Amino acid sequence: MLIGLIAALVACVGYGVASVMQAYGARKSAAAAELRGDDRHVTASGGPTMRSTFAAVLTVSFIVGTLLDVVGFAGSAVSARLIPLFLSQTVISANLVITAVLGTVVLGIQLHRRDWFAISAVILSLLLLGVSAGDAGGGSSNAAVHWGVLAGSAAVLLIGVGLIRWLGSRAAVVSGLISGVLFGGLAIAVRVVDGVDPFDVAVLLRDPAAWAIAVTGLGGFYLHTVALQLGSVNGATAALVVGETVVPGIVGVMILGDASRPGLEWLAVVGFVGAIAGAVAVAVFGAASHDPEDKASVEVSV
């Protein structure tokens, strides 16, 4: 349990700092394109093109953020194997607190009293979850679960890409939410994948869950990048948190045998719901306070 919690905290810090660094890179790249008069970085509906996304990924700060994402992934993979998914994913979701606070320094984001209230609610909810969490369930040898994770992840990714094309510049929170669902699928795939203990490459490559890890990891990374290009880093990250927490939390309890401590099931529910509600509040407040014009001025000045 202790190792799993430490790993989740490492993932929390890694992902939180990574989001800010990646948002900085995305904004700086977009500002540079606007200064050059390059109108190829947005689609007709106002969404980012693949060209602009690729340019954002190649900025130094975005690369640093990606390296931190790798650290975060390692921590999340360890925690997903050792502690209940509803606990590991919710602890990792506290990265929105790090993102919000660090964003005030790096991105010049203003946090209002309502933002701090929502962030405090998330922290309190995490403490309740930590107190109430019990043992983690095992994996699953059911082939339907392994294939289901792969098929479901591919379907969610396609839906996400379609929604981005349809919503354009309004797709920030949706992109963040769907990227979160994919990262939640990643946690499930890591928990159930065969060929890890004991390590066997042949078994690993034959398992659909291993391919689901690739789909969810790459797809989630792409959609999160799009969300950071379109909207508030706090709103995008909070939406991601909702997706990556709810889905694996429910699957962990309903299918994989995760449990809370006897008699404290109610406390786990309160903590889980409180964390999600707080994240939703941060997403809504972040989206409401996001000003594209201010974003451009910040990007040009850095």
Image: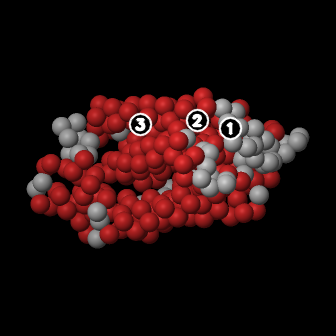
Q: Is residue 146 above or below residue 193?
A: above
Residue 206, percent from left and from top: 53, 42
Q: Residue at x 76, y 62 (%)?
A: 2
Front residue (pair 186, 273): 186
Residue 158, image x, y percentages: 38, 33
**Is residue 101 shown to the viewer in this render?**
no
Q: Residues within 10 Å of mark 3 (few under 14, many from 20)?
A: many
Query: Which residue does the image show at 48% across and 31% down from the upper left?
Result: 151
Label 2 sits on a secondary structure element that is: helix
Location of residue 209 by image quarter: top right
Q: Residue furthest top?
A: 144
| Residue at image mark 3 | 157
Q: Earlier in the sequence, mark 3 or mark 1?
A: 1
Q: Which secondary structure lies at badge 1? A: loop
- Mark 1 Cα within 10 Å, few/some/many (few <14, many 20+)? some
Residue 146 is marked as: 2
